[in-house]
Amino acid sequence: MNIRIPALTALALTLSGTALADSNVTFYGVMDLGISQDRGGIAGTSTRVTSGMATQSRWGFRGNEDLGGGLSAFFVIEGGIHADTGSSTQNNTLFGRNTAVGLRGNFGAISAGLQDTPLFTTLNTIVDPLRNGIARSNNLMASTGFRANNSVLYRSPALNGFSGDAMYAAGEVAGDNAAGRALGGSFGYSDGPLNVRLAYHHRDNNTALVKNLDAARNTLLGANYDFGPAKVYFGYGVDKGLNSASLNNAAATFGGAAPTASTDSRDLLLGVSAPFGVSTVVATYIRKDDRTAFNQDAQQYALAYMYALSKRTDMYTSYALIRNHNGAAYTEGNSEEPGMGNKQFTVGLRHRF
């Protein structure tokens, strides 16, 4: 249940110093807590109370204002919460998930700030039925290009089912406009049970001091189709260049040499989601095909079950396994933690407000 700001007048006054009379502002969030047991790590089994296993715990404000003539202004400020400790996620930033302001009209929408990239939006909404939460897809798939600071994002209106978006993120390096810069976009079709989208992200790795580095380039083709009794998912990614497929847990090893992040890999995701009344069963398979000389391939298998107690509250449990090859050391993580082993069992409670 979203809460309108007029019901939170005291909070609004505290945040802004002025009354927000009749403003269309909503306070919202998710609290997700449960127990995670990780196995397979060299330190042994780890059992923890963990936040955000299925959906990252978060809180935020969003709102819009009708400017007339079909034009409206909108904003969002959103931060992640480690609900088990009360600290902030995203490197301990208060609003590190999304902070943006923009305009929306017949032309589409344009916004600026810290925002999800078109690649991440495609992964989250088209490719992964678990939405990068339990047995998150970026355990193995490209883990860069998910959010961009200093970005400008344009989203087109849908036309006969087709839509596109484009993003530019400034590197803000004096004297070198290309250093640290990111470019991306996506184009797709959505009509009835079918959704198809192709996304691309390019990030320059150069800095003010280090030059001539290879750029990270990620391409992702995704699709899903709802047959009614079940919905099937497909994703295929191509990752090229430095930092195009960063390790989900750079500190992890399984007793051998430290793993090496791939600079040339292919990712495959297959998934199915089947609802049964208030229950939903989800299964996914992900394959990382490392095409460098290290050949550090991996496969992830995951099975999850959700039981809805209401429209806003559900319980869930899951089991996931990663098989690493040739010194690869991918770990079973969730939306807030990279995990500590190659096997993970979870049980949790998720409430949206």
Image (cartoon, grey):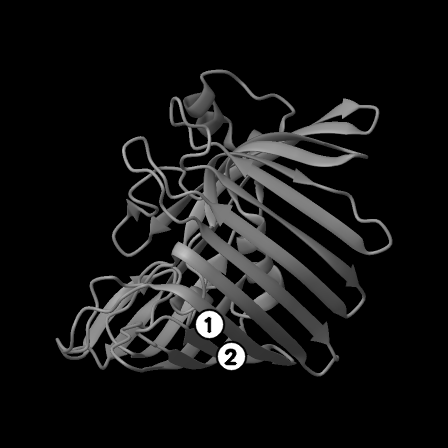
Name of the residue lying farthest toward the right: 160
Q: Is residue 26 visible?
A: no
Residue holding disc 2: 284
Instruction: Tell me the tag on residue 315.
Output: 1
Q: Amino acid at mark 2?
A: Thr
- Mark 1, Cα crowd under 10 Å, few <14 / some 14-19 / many 20+, is some
Is residue 311 placed above or below 176 in the rendered structure? below
Q: Residue at x 20, y 63 (%)?
A: 251
Q: How many marks?
A: 2
Observer able to see residue 194: yes
Q: From the top left corner, tell me how far across and down residue 121 is, in percent.
A: 57, 54
Q: What's the residue at 53%, 54% (across, down)?
A: 120
Q: Nearer the viewer, residue 303 or 325?
A: 325
**Of all residues shown, which one is farthest toward the top?**
18
Q: Earlier in the sequence, mark 1 or mark 2?
A: 2
**Extreme residue toward the front, this view:** 212
Residue at image coords 28%, 75% = 328
x and y percentages locating residue 155 in the rendered image: 69, 42
Q: Percent position (x, y) of residue 184? A: 57, 46
SS for callout 1 = strand
Depth check, front residue: 301 or 308: 301
Horizontal relation, residue 55 to residue 196: left or right = left
Q: Crowding at label 2, few (<14), some or many (≥20) Cα neighbours within 10 Å?
A: many
Helix, strand or loop under label 2:
strand
Q: Is residue 295 above or below residue 182?
A: below
